[in-house]
Image (cartoon, grey):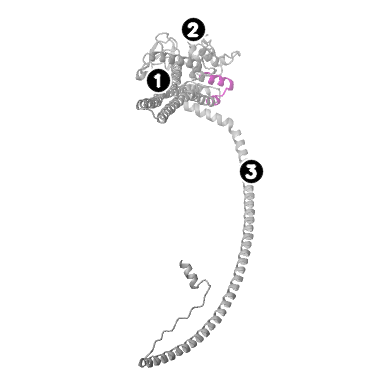
């Protein structure tokens, strides 16, 4: 990005703007008049005397020291030089003076406590503004508290009050940050390092640049642009090295970016807290609804009581949902402008980086390796290349020492790691050997136990075999005895059956003979039975029946 100069039509101050603002309107940081930035850069005026640069009179009326030298080859070397012209050699031989310090604006109780440029705003001031706006808001919504919109703030429990306060507090912070961002954008129009003071930034010209910066509007003294430029030239004055200044400016750019990102921490906390408060209101509403429903069910009253209890239940649910809705809407109202504002501040940091690269780093001249010619040529890539070469040349020997140390450390670490692995491997082998020995002992013990059990089982099998043999012998003996008994029984039965057969044959012959003869049946008087006194006697049977 390139920059060009224009003049303010109101105060005739010199402004330096970037090409990205072409065709836009901005407020002058000096007189606050509206400045229309042209579409194209105006042509630069040609010098009255080629090769000689004469300093211009500043707006304050105080003449500045001349920073140019006569370079025309046709100039008389023995002649006198005009008093208004000052050579670079004469500037370097000037007597040493006390270094000019930057003028800083006095800090107020409501401003940031940091000495450098910051994107932070006063939390006390923003709280007072947010609290006042919250009170005004509740005062405005009090007459309409019975409407649906007013009930969101007045009839939904205690949660909407802190939610509204946090929202207006966050909006107050955003408003103050927007004013600070507007000041940062206005400061981007300032010509902080004018070429009229000196075309190059050398150690001898730093005081004149500081004096010019002190004459800038007071509101711009705490901006990122002025703070970055002042820190860069002060570091260059102390270290007298363009390469170190380049490194420092990179670090300062990272610091400013972190400053911008860190200034939104409290806003992120507020954006996180708003939905949490809404969920707390939801829990309170649901708890109230459940409690009302439980009391109505336990009472067991009439239908009117049940209707009243249901109204309380629905009222609690309405509180739960309305507080969550209100908190989510407020969170969106804070999140969207906060993201847009953070993006704008990051763009400002990027523009400051581009301005410093274009107007500060490329003009640094530390007197090493043709710094003046380098500054006159204006090659930004050459500046960075030479700065990197100087930085590498400064630290080359140190880097070699560190590399040798790292090589030694690496070798030592390799040896230690190898020795450590050997020890670990040895320990692992010892542990494995111990484990194998334990397993072998356990295996031998288990085998001994199994052998003892097998011996016991073999003894038991022998005893069982002997018992079975004895039982077989007894069974054989019993079988022979049974066979003998069966034979004797068969013989006896045969003899008895033969006798029965003989008797039946004799009976049959008797019956045949009786069939041919008359049989006389004579009645014989019955003899009295002897008395029996036993349990089964007739008398006892009679008694038993009686």
Q: Secondary structure at mark 2?
A: loop
Local packing at callout 2 (Cα closer than 10 Å; few below 14, some 14-19, many 20+) is few
Foreground mark, 2 or 1? 1
The residue tagged 1 is 155
Local packing at callout 1 (Cα closer than 10 Å; few below 14, some 14-19, many 20+) is some
User: Mark 2 or mark 1: which comes first in sequence?
Assistant: 2
Foreground mark, 3 or 2? 3
Q: Is residue 240 magenta?
A: yes
Marks 2/1: CA–CA distance: 63 Å
Q: Are marks 3 and 1 in contact (CB under 8 Å)?
A: no
The residue tagged 3 is 412
Magenta residues (range):
229-246
Q: Secondary structure at mark 1?
A: loop
Disc marking residue 191: none
Marks 3/2: CA–CA distance: 68 Å
User: Mark 3 or mark 2: which comes first in sequence?
Assistant: 2
The image position of residue 332, as x and y in percent, is 40, 24
The residue tagged 2 is 60
Seen in the image, is 64 located left or right of residue 323?
Answer: right
The image position of residue 35, as x and y in percent, is 39, 13
- Along the line of sight, the residue nearer the viewer: 7 or 125: 125
Does residue 69 appear in this view? no
Q: Is residue 437 magenta?
A: no
- Along the line of sight, the residue nearer the viewer: 124 or 111: 124
């Amino acid at each position: 990005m390139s920059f060009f100069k224009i003049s303010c039509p109101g105060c005739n101050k010199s402004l330096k703007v970037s090409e990205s603002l072409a065709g836009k309107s901005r407020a002058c940081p000096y007189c606050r008049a509206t400045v229309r930035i042209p579409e194209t850069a105006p042509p630069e005026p040609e010098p009255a005397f080629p090769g000689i640069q004469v300093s211009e009179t500043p707006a304050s009326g105080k003449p500045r020291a001349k920073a140019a030298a006569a370079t025309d080859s046709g100039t008389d070397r023995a002649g006198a030089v005009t008093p208004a012209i000052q050579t670079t050699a004469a500037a370097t031989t000037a007597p040493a003076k006390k270094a000019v310090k930057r003028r800083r604006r006095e800090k107020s109780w409501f401003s940031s406590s940091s000495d450098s440029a910051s994107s932070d705003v006063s939390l006390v001031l923003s709280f007072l503004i947010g609290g006042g706006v919250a009170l005004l808001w509740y005062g405005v919504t009090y007459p309409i508290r019975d409407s649906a919109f007013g009930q969101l703030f007045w009839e939904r429990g205690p949660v909407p009050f802190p939610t509204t306060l946090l929202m207006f507090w966050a909006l107050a912070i955003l408003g103050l940050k927007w004013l600070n961002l507007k000041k940062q954008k206005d400061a981007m129009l300032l010509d902080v390092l004018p070429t009229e003071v000196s075309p190059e930034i050398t150690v001898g010209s730093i005081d004149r640049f500081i004096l010019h910066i002190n004459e800038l509007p007071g509101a711009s003294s705490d901006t990122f642009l002025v703070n970055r430029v002042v820190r860069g030239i002060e570091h260059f004055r102390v270290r007298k090295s363009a390469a170190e200044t380049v490194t420092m400016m990179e670090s300062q750019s990272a610091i400013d970016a972190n400053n911008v990102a860190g200034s939104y921490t409290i806003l992120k906390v507020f954006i996180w807290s708003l939905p949490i408060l809404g969920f707390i209101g939801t829990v309170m509403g649901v708890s109230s609804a459940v409690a009302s429903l439980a009391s109505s069910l336990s009472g067991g009253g009439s239908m009117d009581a049940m209707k009243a209890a249901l109204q309380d239940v629905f009222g609690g649910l309405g509180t739960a949902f309305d507080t969550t809705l209100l908190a989510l809407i407020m969170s969106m109202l804070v999140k969207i402008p906060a993201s847009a504002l953070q993006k704008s501040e990051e763009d400002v940091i990027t523009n400051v980086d581009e301005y410093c690269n274009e107007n500060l780093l490329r003009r640094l001249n530390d007197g090493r390796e043709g710094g003046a010619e380098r500054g006159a040529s204006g090659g930004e890539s050459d500046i960075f290349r030479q700065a990197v070469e100087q930085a590498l040349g400064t630290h080359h020997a140190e880097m070699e020492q560190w590399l040798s140390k790292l090589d030694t450390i690496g070798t030592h670490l390799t040896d230690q790691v190898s020795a450590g692995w050997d020890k670990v491997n040895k320990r692992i082998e010892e542990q494995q050997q111990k484990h194998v020995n334990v397993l072998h002992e356990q295996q031998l013990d288990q085998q001994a136990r199994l052998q003892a059990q097998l011996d016991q089982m073999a003894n038991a099998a022998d005893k069982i075999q002997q018992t079975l043999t004895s039982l077989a012998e007894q069974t054989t003996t019993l079988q022979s005895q049974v066979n003998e008994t069966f034979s004797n029984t068969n013989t006896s039965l045969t003899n008895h059956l033969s006798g029965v057969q003989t008797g039946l044959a004799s009976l049959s012959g008797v019956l045949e003979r009786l069939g041919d003869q008359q049989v006389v049946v004579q009645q014989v008087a019955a003899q009295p039975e002897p008395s029996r006194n036993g349990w089964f006697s007739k008398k006892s049977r009679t008694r038993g029946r009686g």
